[in-house]
């Protein structure tokens, strides 16, 4: 067997519970779990405050209990995140717990430790998503706050050579929007299977740490594109569609040209030049985020509505607050959803297939 190839296992039996999730505010199953292993992070990103927090690591006893609860809830996929997931000293063991529970494990990482720990990554996860916020050393350092551009590319190459599918994720902002085409080229050359883009979030007070101390919802507007940037951004997107048509056709760029143009609409709306496009999202009906201390969120961008710190995950998913949250987001009553930069939608067929 090729090193890093996940152990072969029969496909999971079809489970109707995720379909029942869509009918009410109560979750009977949890196909997707985002697990914050640690608050620690070795990047210093300009659009995130998580790295400023005191470091906390998820307790192993909690991780073990969550893995068992996830199995009982028909869990299919777990995303190891943080902070920086690889800063947790026992992240490989936690990955193993969830694999043993029958889940596919995706590691979300800044990539700083990928090269050093490539063998561990290859042996313990099924796929990797790496943040890549520039096409050159200078841009990467300006956005991420550390001089590690080539370290990250070497890490991508190392795990890709071991057989793992790698996706790069770029947060589009003023510092890097002109480099989108070059970012695709650099990522693919390093071995990435897929390149993905999303807009920098400058409005949400829940995600990325306690950034809004001033009370100004646009306190991070220095990262958002301005009115003057938007014509050039439109040209960048047009040029990317023309020059990388083969990559779009092959799925090497995760988003379609039309979906990437929603980024332009998002920045135009931030500048009062357009309306935000309502996102197609039903993530709270099939996924959840569990933080280091067991706090449970319906979504990365929504406030906590329960805790699995001292109780069952199923109970934490279905508190009165959590069920009300699902009703409210579905009815368009959650302001956090209006300008969401990372909506996630799965239809009945995908949920029946197991995501």
Image (cartoon, helix red, strand yellow):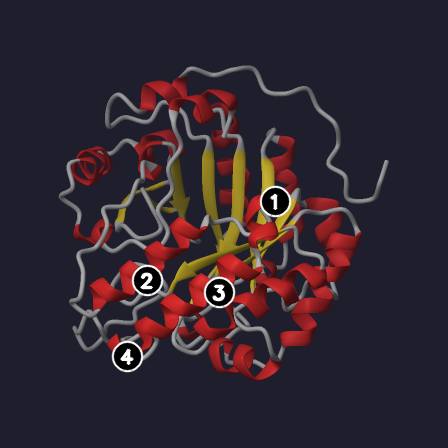
117 relative to 78 in the view: left or right? right
| Labels 2 and 3: the sequence-earlier one | 3
Can you give x and y, in whole percent of width and height, for residue 352 in the image?
Answer: 46, 20
Q: Nearer the viewer, residue 3 or 36?
A: 3
- In this rendering, the label closer to the viewer, 2 or 3: 3
Residue occupied by mark 4: 228
Real-space CA distance between mark 2 and mark 3, rounded to the nearest whole angstrom: 14 Å
150 relative to 5 in the view: left or right? left
Q: Nearer the viewer, residue 105 or 132?
A: 132
Relative vertical location of residue 349 with respect to residue 181 in this rendering, above or below: above
The residue lying furthest to the right in this view is 1
Element under label 1? helix
Real-space CA distance between mark 4 and mark 1, rounded to the nearest whole angstrom: 33 Å
Residue occupied by mark 3: 239
Q: Residue at x 39, y 50 (%)?
A: 259
Q: Quadrant of the N terminus?
A: top right
Can you give x and y, in whole percent of width and height, for residue 119 in the image?
Answer: 78, 54
Cβ atoms at labels 1 and 3 below 8 Å apart: no
| Labels 4 and 3: the sequence-earlier one | 4
Real-space CA distance between mark 4 and mark 2, rounded to the nearest whole angstrom: 12 Å
- In this rendering, the label closer to the viewer, 4 or 3: 3
Residue occupied by mark 2: 264
Real-space CA distance between mark 4 and mark 3, rounded to the nearest whole angstrom: 18 Å
Q: Residue at x 48, y 65 (%)?
A: 239
Cβ atoms at labels 4 and 2 below 8 Å apart: no
């Amino acid at each position: 067997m090729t090193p890093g190839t996940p152990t072969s296992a029969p496909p999971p039996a079809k489970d109707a519970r995720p379909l029942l999730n869509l009918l009410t505010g109560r979750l009977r199953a949890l196909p997707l779990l985002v697990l914050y292993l640690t608050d620690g992070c070795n990047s210093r990103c300009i659009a995130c405050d998580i790295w400023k927090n005191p470091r906390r690591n998820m307790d192993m006893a909690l991780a073990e209990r969550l893995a068992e609860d996830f199995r009982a809830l028909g869990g299919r996929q777990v995303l190891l995140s943080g902070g920086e997931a690889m800063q947790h000293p026992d992240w490989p063991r936690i990955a193993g717990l969830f694999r043993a529970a029958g889940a596919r494990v995706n590691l979300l990482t800044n990539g700083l430790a990928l090269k050093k720990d490539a063998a561990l990554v290859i042996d313990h996860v099924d796929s990797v998503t790496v943040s890549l916020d520039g096409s050159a050393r200078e841009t990467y350092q300006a956005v991420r706050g550390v001089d590690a551009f080539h370290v990250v590319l070497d890490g991508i190459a190392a795990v890709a050579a071991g057989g793992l599918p790698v996706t790069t994720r770029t947060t589009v902002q003023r510092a890097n929007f002109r480099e989108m085409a070059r970012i695709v080229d650099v990522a693919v050359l390093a071995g990435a299977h897929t390149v993905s883009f999303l807009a920098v979030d400058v409005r949400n007070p829940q995600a990325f740490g306690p950034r809004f101390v001033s009370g100004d919802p646009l306190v991070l507007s220095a990262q958002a594109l301005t009115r003057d940037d938007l014509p050039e951004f439109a040209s960048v997107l047009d040029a990317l569609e023309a020059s990388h048509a083969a990559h779009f056709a092959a799925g090497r760029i995760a988003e379609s040209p039309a979906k990437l143009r929603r980024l332009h609409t998002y920045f135009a709306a931030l500048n009062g030049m357009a309306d935000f496009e309502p996102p197609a999202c039903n993530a709270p009906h099939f996924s959840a985020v569990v933080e280091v201390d067991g706090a449970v969120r319906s979504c990365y961008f929504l406030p906590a509505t329960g805790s699995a710190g001292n109780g069952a995950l199923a109970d934490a998913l279905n508190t009165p607050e959590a069920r009300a949250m699902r009703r409210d987001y579905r009815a368009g009553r959650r302001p956090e959803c209006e300008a969401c930069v990372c909506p996630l939608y799965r239809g009945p067929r995908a949920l029946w297939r197991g995501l």
